[in-house]
Image (cartoon, helix red, strand yellow):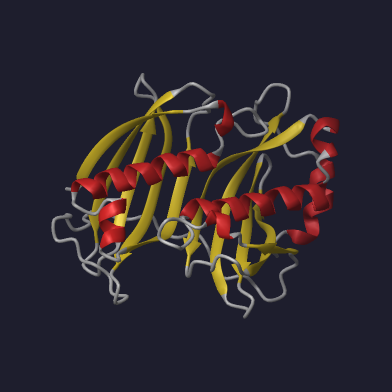
């Protein structure tokens, strides 16, 4: 058993990405609302936490996108909450449209930390019973060829808890994905080959949140390549060389004109071959 609550939110024009679909980060924002909606019912809403010096710290995320959405959609965010004995909170978000069609499924972990730096144990939250998602992320090999970028972590991404929300980590990885395509593949190839890729889902493991105002190194490469899809890997590295977060996502090749799955263009494979894990 777990606690459950449903909220409903509208998508807007400003939620659209360059493919004119609702961007992946919108679903994380909606889920973030779902998390605090259920926590507020337990007495741990944003204002209550801030008054008591309690910090909300984001952890790992698994996400699967199931149905494309556009501006003006009314979506139900069904949030279930359970916990571990150590105090880690496990949120399961099912996002669906008004016909009850699944749009997105998202699993996220987080914890509440008091002013003394200790995790809070929310006794009113049921213990986690079901199996949680097993991580598909493995450590980066030292000899791996990567695209490398130095990226500042802006203070403007900071949440009211003075740390980074998980959406900010999503944004860093999204930036890395575009930089990889721009510099390694060439964005012009999208129109020339009538091919693009859709972000089908993925996993983010946050080991330690980057500090706002610092600079991180983002490493990007390809985990595995298949006929119509590839699995993209990225690591966020601190200025001291510590791995702060890792991502593995699934990219599906589709025809730009029809949005139908297609084989990867040979031009794509030739340009990324050296970045594929051996």
Image vertical order of residue 77 relative to residue 111, above or below: above
Q: Position of residue 178 (x, y in %)?
A: 71, 47
Q: Position of residue 162 (x, y in %)?
A: 45, 63
In this picture, residue 166 sits left or right of residue 45 = right
Most distant residue in the front direction: 51
Q: Can you see residue 130? A: no
Query: 201 or 169, which lies in front?
Result: 169
Most distant residue in the bottom direction: 240
Residue at horizontal 79%, vertical 29%?
Answer: 194
Query: 155 or 145, which lies in front?
Result: 155
* Picture quadrant where residue 190 is located: top right
Quadrant of the rendering where the C terminus is positioned: bottom right
Most distant residue in the top direction: 99
Query: 44 or 170, which lies in front?
Result: 44
Q: Can you see residue 7? A: yes
* Picture quadrant where residue 116 is located: bottom left
Image vertical order of residue 89 relative to residue 9, above or below: below
Image vertical order of residue 74 relative to residue 200, above or below: above
Image vertical order of residue 151 relative to residue 106, above or below: below
Most distant residue in the left direction: 124
In this picture, residue 106 sits left or right of residue 2 = right
* Picture quadrant where residue 188 is located: top right
Residue at horizontal 27%, vertical 60%?
Answer: 51
Residue at horizontal 73%, vertical 27%?
Answer: 256
Q: Position of residue 31 (x, y in %)?
A: 39, 43
Query: 94 or 162, which lies in front?
Result: 162
Q: Position of residue 244 (x, y in %)?
A: 54, 70
Image label count? 0
């Amino acid at each position: 058993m777990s606690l459950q609550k449903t909220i409903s939110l509208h998508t807007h024009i400003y939620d659209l990405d360059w493919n004119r679909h609702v961007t992946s980060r919108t679903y994380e924002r909606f889920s973030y609302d779902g998390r605090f909606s259920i926590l507020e019912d337990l007495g741990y809403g944003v204002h209550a936490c801030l008054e008591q010096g309690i910090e909300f710290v984001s952890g790992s995320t698994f996400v699967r996108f199931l149905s494309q959405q556009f501006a003006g959609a009314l979506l139900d965010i069904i949030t279930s909450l359970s916990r571990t004995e150590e105090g880690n909170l496990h949120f399961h978000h099912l996002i669906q449209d008004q016909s009850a069609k699944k749009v997105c499924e998202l699993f996220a972990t987080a914890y509440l930390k008091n002013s003394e730096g200790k995790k809070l144990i929310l006794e009113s939250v049921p213990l986690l019973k079901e199996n949680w998602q097993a991580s598909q992320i493995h450590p980066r090999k030292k000899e791996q060829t990567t695209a490398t970028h130095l990226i500042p972590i802006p203070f403007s991404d900071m949440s009211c808890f003075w740390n980074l929300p998980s959406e900010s980590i999503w944004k860093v990885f999204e930036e890395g994905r575009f930089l990889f395509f721009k510099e390694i593949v060439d964005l012009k190839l999208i129109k020339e080959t009538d091919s693009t890729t859709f972000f089908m889902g993925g996993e983010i493991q946050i080991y330690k949140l980057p500090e706002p105002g610092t600079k991180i190194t983002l490493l990007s490469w390809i985990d595995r390549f298949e006929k119509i899809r590839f699995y993209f890997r990225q690591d966020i590295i601190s200025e001291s060389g510590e791995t702060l977060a890792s991502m593995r996502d699934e990219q599906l090749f589709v025809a730009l004109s029809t949005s139908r799955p297609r084989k990867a263009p040979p031009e794509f494979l030739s340009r990324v071959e050296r970045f594929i894990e051996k």
